[in-house]
Every structure is written in C-alpha cells, then in structure tokens.
Amino acid sequence: MSASDPPSWSGEPAEFDDYAAEYEGGLDNPIKRLMGNSPDQFIAVKARWLLRREPMLRTGGLSVLDYGCGVGSLMRVLIGLGGKGEFTGCDISTGMLRQVERRWPRELGAPPALAPQQGARTPFADAAFDMVMISAVLHHVPIAERPAVYAELGRVLKPGGRIYVFEHNPRNPLVRYVTARTPIDRNAILLDATEVRHGLLDAARYTLDTDYLMFMPPGLAFLRGIDPLLAWLPMGAQYAVTARKAA
C-alpha cells in the first residue's frame, strides 16, 4: 500500500484491497452458491426493494451515496434495473474503487463519481445527498468505530433525506453458518437491526423503519413475491433499516 492509500477502520491497510481483483460477493462459499449462482442475484434483492421504497429512483432527481461501495455492485445492479440518479461511491479500499471503473458496463454510461474514505470520514460536504445506502459494511467495522460511521452518514445526508442500511441478519442461523465460513468475512462481527437503530438514533434525529429480506433463495425468481409478505418477520437473511432524517 502506498503512502497515499487511505487507512482502514483500525488504521491498518484496507483488508479488502486483498480481495478487490477477484471479489465475487462471497460466492466462494459453497452454501451461498446453492442459493444463487451469481452475486448479482443477491444484490438485486436489495436493489428491487430500494426501487419499491424510493419511487424517485425510477424517475431521477436524487443525489445518492453508496457508502462503502466496494466494487460498485449495488449501484451497477440498481442502475441496470432502471434506477436513475446522481450516483457517488466511496470506500476505504482504493483497490475496490479501482475495480468499480474496470467492471462498469459501457451500456450503463459513465461510471459513478468515486472518492476514497479516511476511515469513517468521507470528503463530501455536509448535507450533500438526498439518499445514502450502506450495504454489508457495518459488520466489517470494529464495534468501537461504528458510532463514527453513523455520525458520518448523518453528516452528509440532507434534512428529510433517507439512509438505507442493509446487513446480514444474525438471527438467521444459516447466515451465521455461511458468514463464519466465508474468507472475506473472517473478521466480521454481525450486528442485529436493533443495534443499527440505536446507533443511528445516537447520532441524529430520525424516523426509523425495519424490513427483513431474502427469505427465499435469490436464484429462484418464481418465489420473489414472498419476501414482501414476510418483511415483518425477523428471520430473513438480510434486513434493511430505513432512517428518515428530520427536516
């Protein structure tokens, strides 16, 4: 890592740099491969949920930050499914950010604007974004450093804006099994939706909501309609915490 590369959460070299070139969303785990044969199938569950939740993502007009964007998969899948907006990604791993541009499909137009993080901190101005997404990031952040992330999410969000936190659900035993056996998650510490809610409320004033996702294997499209019916049940493989900032 060069002197210009950003530190990771704990000040060590960003561990995701080691995975950037071959990152495939954890599908090196054989159990996860049984549920879906492409990382995009898992990401599309979140993208479709966002498109239902945020109608303006269909029409454009939102400034959107993907915090801890990795190789840009959520932005890419969201735009591929019809999402429109002014997208920006940031990450502590410069290796991952380089992969965003290398992997971005030409048919989707120019890749999103990208910026490195310095730990939890981003280079963006206060109240810069209408919407902030943070997907499968917090479980990689040491517990003591998570408050700084919640504070940063609130700092860059406009009044009345929305934060969407997607995380692995530790209440689901299969999630715990898979995470414990996935190399990229070797240092992960899973967190319950309650911790996310409390962490956000400690940082700013929000109206909160929680949905649970991914009850069915993402690879089985004909079962897709079941997820919205079970969103109240805290056993889905993923959850989504929505935080609407006070105006």
Image: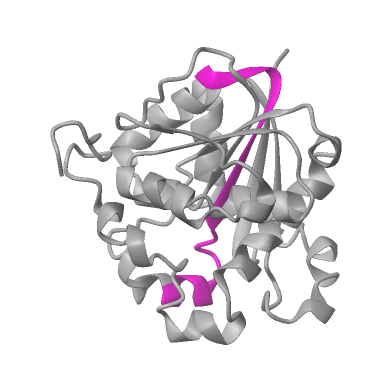
Q: Is residue 164 magenta?
A: yes
Image point (46%, 76%), residue name = 27
Q: In this view, does 77 lie above or below 109?
A: below
Q: In which quarter of the image is the C terminus?
A: top right
Q: Does the magenta stretch include residue 228?
A: no
> Does residue 78 appear in this view?
no
Q: Which of 135 and 101 is in front in this view?
A: 101
Rendered location of residue 90, percent (x, y):
45, 36
Using residue 223 as the reference point, say whether residue 165 is left or right of it. Answer: left
Q: Residue furthest front?
A: 106
Rendered location of residue 236, percent (x, y):
65, 66
Q: Which of 140 and 172 is in front in this view?
A: 140
Q: In this view, does 114 lie above or below 99?
A: above
Q: Which of 200 and 71 is in front in this view?
A: 71
Q: Which of 89 and 165 is in front in this view?
A: 89
How many numbered marks have been drawn onto this rendered protein structure? 0
Image point (45%, 24%), residue name = 152
Using residue 18 as the reference point, say whether residue 82 is left or right of it. Answer: right
Rendered location of residue 49, percent (x, y):
75, 53
> Does residue 96 appear in this view?
yes
The residue segment tinted magenta is: 155-178
Image point (38%, 36%), residue name = 146
Image point (70%, 49%), residue name = 79
Q: Quadrant of the N terminus?
A: top left
Q: In this view, does 241 lie above or below 43?
A: above
Using residue 67 as the reference point, say whether residue 230 is left or right of it. Answer: right
Tell me which colouring the rendered structure shows. Answer: one colour
Rendered location of residue 153, percent (x, y):
51, 27
**Which image quarter: residue 183?**
bottom left
